[in-house]
Image (spheres, coloured by chain):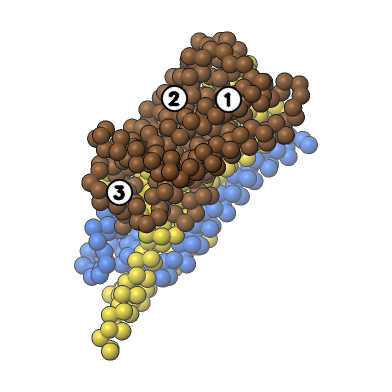
Chain colours: A blue, B yellow, C brown
Amino acid sequence: MSNTFFIVAGWITVLGGSAAYATVVILRGRALSLRVPVDRRRWSSTPQQESRPIARPLDGPLDGPLDGPLSRP
Amino acid sequence: MTTELQAESGPRGAAESAHVPTIDPGPHSTSSPATRALGIAVLAGFAMLAYLGLAGTPEDRVQGELVRLLYVHPQSATVAYLGCFLATTGSVMYLWKRSLWWDLVAHSTAEIGAVFTAFALLTGMLWGRPSWGTYWVWDARLTSTAMLMLLLLGYLALRKLPGDPDVRARQSAIVGLLLVPNVILVRQSVTWWRTLHQAPTLSLPGAEIEGLLLFTMMFGFAVFSGLFLWLTIHRFRVAWLVRQVDELAVNEAITARIAEGTSR
Amino acid sequence: MFRDATLVAAKDLRIEWRSRVGINQIAPFALLILVLFAFALGPDGGLLSKATPGLYWVAVLLCGLLAVQRSFAVEASDGATDALRLSGIEPSALFLGKTAAVLVQILALDLVLLLGVTILYGTTFTGWVLVAGTVLSASVGIAAAGTLYGVLAAGLRVRETLLPLLLLPVLAPVLIGSTRAFEAALAGTTSEGWLWFGLLSVFALMYIAAGAALFGPLLEEA
């Protein structure tokens, strides 16, 4: 087999693999976010929403990401 | 990734109805404006990298065409080790702070680390077949990367078990904490194992690469780091959602029980 | 702390001695592995004698795994783990005690297997100091890592399958190190062997430290 085969196979592995993995993550996220109210996933809310106090019955000390995508609670 | 980018067209104006607690109006995805921008940048980066790596760069003097695999292989390996390192950091911080945040970081980065370890192994094998004439040699790097894969698979197997999430987080944190020390020990022993008994190991000749080829390689590192960041954020949010769904289920069960009690 | 550790170790060893599982099941299993290797590799040509270091340590790993699983199967019944937790013994002492008990069993298995390979494979051992040092340091490493991962898997329903997956990759440096040290001892190049002995000691110390520090968080339940 020619070198081209191995090169193309390698690139397909990485590009296809990461695209597939990213798709799985995205789809899981979509399915799950349907079942979680928006105040528990702050990244999809607008800033003015975040400033409003929201009652969260079961939130303990382990509260969610507050503002940035990965900010500390 | 493309599916995520389309999510941008989701109903942004729906935010004002968010004060109804049970009905969820927001866009149903793990993406935010920042990750969308990052996602686009990473996609563009990969297009650029693919052009440079597959067509835009000349052949290497030593490697020939096969240098084109060096634009994805070392990058995958680096991201894999980065994920492994962050998994251990997350585990240590979890045991110290006991915060859900660090637990989820450890889980997410370990999973991504495993994915990229698989990429590194596969591209390494695809590089080795035409270069060394065989898919697998018991080279120190290959062997220790394979061991890293096995360690990560063990960690993820533990994570996947059902049960109390806090107990599982603690157990996983201890396995995760030992991940990097184990990798170091394995690497050290495997390196000695090879070098004390055989001729020096085969290695990827990257030192003599220069010019546009070197730039492409470095650019690859940047693009892969961006992809890693993007994946980590999204995987973290998925892990966060999983915890929320579990909690809500418990909450509902409790409410149902209370309602049962009062109606009697 | 060491008094408590001795108590725990003595308790485990007493249980083992009374149940005779080690003598009646694990030791014969160790010899069975040696016979199986002989079947797989063929009795002639000195192949077995040449491969002794590797075969010996694979056998030790497999039997050690059984000893570790046994050590926590003992605790699983009758709420014994809760009793231990409530006993007021420090987690680190508990870890050291359980490790010591497993270590004693593994050392006994080491001796059985050494005798086995000498008789069955016709291996003649040289460099006894290095052999003894390797056996000791490798066994401490196996016992310490095994106890740490063993308690982790102990409460799980899938412990029989999960423990090997978690533990055996971790023990890869021990297998490599002890095998090479044995080879060096048999070949008479002991200086190289002591290098491996160093690696095994680092591994053992690391896992004793990690186990003593981390046993607490592992024991606490929800």
Identify the residue position indicated by label 3 in the image: C84
Q: Which residue is at a point 72% across and 30% down the rendered structure image?
A: C41
| Label 3 packing within 10 angstroms: few (<14), some (14-19), many (20+) | some
Report whether mark 3 lies on the same chain as mark 2: yes
Residue type for callout 3: Leu
Quarter of the figure with the N terminus of chain C: top left
Task: Determine whether label 3 and label 2 are within 8 Å by CB.
Answer: no
Residue B147 drawn at (x, y percent): 54, 36
- Secondary-structure class at tag 1: helix
Identify the residue position indicated by label 1 in the image: C115
Which residue is the extreme one toward the bottom?
A: B264
Name the residue nearer the viewer: C68 or B31: C68
Q: Which residue is at a point 28% across and 75% down the rendered structure image?
A: B19
Sequence-wise first label, 3 or 2: 3
Left or right of residue A67: residue B12: right
In the displayed structure, C31 sits above or below C88; it is above
- Secondary-structure class at tag 3: helix
Query: To which quarter of the image does residue B143 belong?
Result: top right
For marks 2 and 1, give the CA distance. Answer: 19 Å
Sequence-wise first label, 3 or 1: 3
Q: Is residue A27 visible?
A: yes
In the displayed structure, B198 sits above or below C144; it is above
